[in-house]
Image (spheres, rainbow, N blue to C red):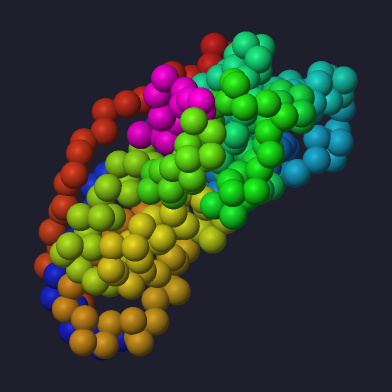
């Protein structure tokens, strides 16, 4: 490909977050500890390459726990699972390793606590996303409602208006959440927020980095799978801040037409994208003569401990 790209701005932080690192490490440790096949309920993280790599090692991914043979070893995904899934696993006598991200667990705990205190929950998230399904499964359906748009926020009619609280999917855009929250606050003056935002710090850091990338380049490439919520949010943030953005699984999806009259490109990656895919993309531009510049917004030093059974 002929390209006139002279500079590549590489966002930092990018790629794996602490929750994804933990989940992937857990599956690898389970593979070492037990014989294959190992079963994983739902994609361990939303990345096509990672899923393919694990399948080659003998991991079988399923959506329904009933598809896992009784007594098998199974890992639950980083997105969290509702209680009924855990109950099914116990009945099938599965050996379970739960790779749920600790930040998602926090939202599960909040949901249960606030319902016990008599609150009705507005849960901002994406319908049918694994994380949303997991959180909403923690409480009675009469105590929570999913809000996925401003239109839904305008129409919602809660059973009471004295004790209302907002929780949200961790991988959303902070800007999107604020917009919906503002609409809800206008309608329900007594509405309160939990003590701290449920937007994942890694998600927010990567979004902030994209905002800075957009100041340097109006063409941004985002490594991530189409099923990745946080990767899609990065694309939306880039667009909102005036950059053309392309969500790609790897460098093979690059198109010539994206770089006509383009001299600088920004690169970032969703929280479930492995380093080797990012490095391949950077090397692609290096070989074309582009200068690579790291654009560091903040340094992350957080690591989540593994569960005791590993």
Magenta includes 191?
yes
State the extent of the magenta-drawn residues as a range: 190-201
Residue drawn at 40 percent across, 61 percent down: 235
Q: Position of residue 103 (x, y in %)?
A: 47, 27
Residue drawn at 47 percent across, 63 percent down: 249
What secondary structure predominates along the stretch shown in magenta? loop
Quarter in which the C terminus is drawn = top right
Residue situated in front as seen by the camera: 264 or 142: 142
Q: Give the quadrant of residue 122.
A: top right
Q: Is any atom of residue 242 visible in this view?
A: yes
Residue drawn at 55 percent across, 26 percent down: 165
Q: Position of residue 150 (x, y in %)?
A: 54, 52
Quarter in which the N terminus is drawn = bottom left
Q: Position of residue 30 (x, y in %)?
A: 60, 28
Relative to 94, does residue 28 appear above or below in the rendering? Answer: below
Magenta includes 30?
no
Residue situated in front as seen by the camera: 45 or 288: 45
Relative to 132, does residue 143 appear above or below in the rendering? Answer: above
**In the image: residue 278, left or right of residue 36:** left
Q: Is any atom of residue 173 visible in this view?
A: no
- Counting labels gives 0
Q: Position of residue 189 (x, y in %)?
A: 49, 30
Relative to 2, does residue 164 appear above or below in the rendering? Answer: above
Residue situated in front as seen by the camera: 42 or 104: 104
Residue drawn at 35 percent across, 87 percent down: 257
**In the image: residue 258, left or right of residue 53:** left
């Amino acid at each position: 490909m002929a390209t006139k790209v002279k500079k590549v701005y590489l966002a930092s932080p990018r790629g794996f977050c602490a929750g994804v690192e933990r989940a992937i490490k857990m599956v690898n440790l389970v593979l070492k500890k037990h014989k294959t096949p190992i079963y994983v309920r739902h994609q361990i993280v939303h990345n096509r390459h990672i899923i393919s790599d694990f399948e080659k090692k003998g991991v079988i991914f399923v959506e329904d726990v009933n598809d896992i043979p009784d007594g098998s070893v199974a890992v639950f995904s980083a997105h969290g699972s509702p209680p009924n899934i855990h109950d099914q696993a116990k009945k099938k006598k599965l050996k379970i390793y739960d790779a749920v991200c600790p930040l998602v667990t926090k939202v599960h705990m909040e949901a249960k606590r606030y319902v016990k205190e008599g609150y009705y929950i507005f849960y901002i998230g994406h319908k049918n996303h694994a994380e949303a399904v997991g959180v909403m499964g923690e409480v009675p359906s009469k105590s929570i409602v999913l809000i996925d748009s401003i239109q839904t926020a305008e129409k919602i009619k809660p059973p009471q208006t004295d004790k209302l609280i907002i929780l949200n999917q961790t991988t959303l855009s902070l800007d999107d959440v604020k917009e919906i929250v503002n609409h809800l606050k206008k309608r329900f003056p007594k509405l309160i927020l939990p003590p701290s935002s449920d937007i994942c710090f890694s998600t927010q850091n990567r979004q902030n980095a994209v905002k800075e990338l957009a100041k340097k380049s109006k063409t941004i490439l985002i490594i991530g799978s189409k099923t990745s919520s946080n990767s899609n949010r990065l694309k939306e943030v880039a667009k909102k801040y005036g950059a053309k953005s392309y969500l790609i699984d790897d460098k093979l999806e690059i198109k010539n037409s994206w770089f006509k009259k383009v001299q600088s490109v920004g690169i970032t990656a969703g929280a479930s994208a492995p380093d080797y895919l990012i490095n391949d993309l950077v090397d692609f531009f290096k070989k074309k003569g582009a200068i690579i510049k790291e654009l560091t917004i903040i340094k992350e030093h957080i690591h989540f401990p593994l569960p005791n059974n590993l």
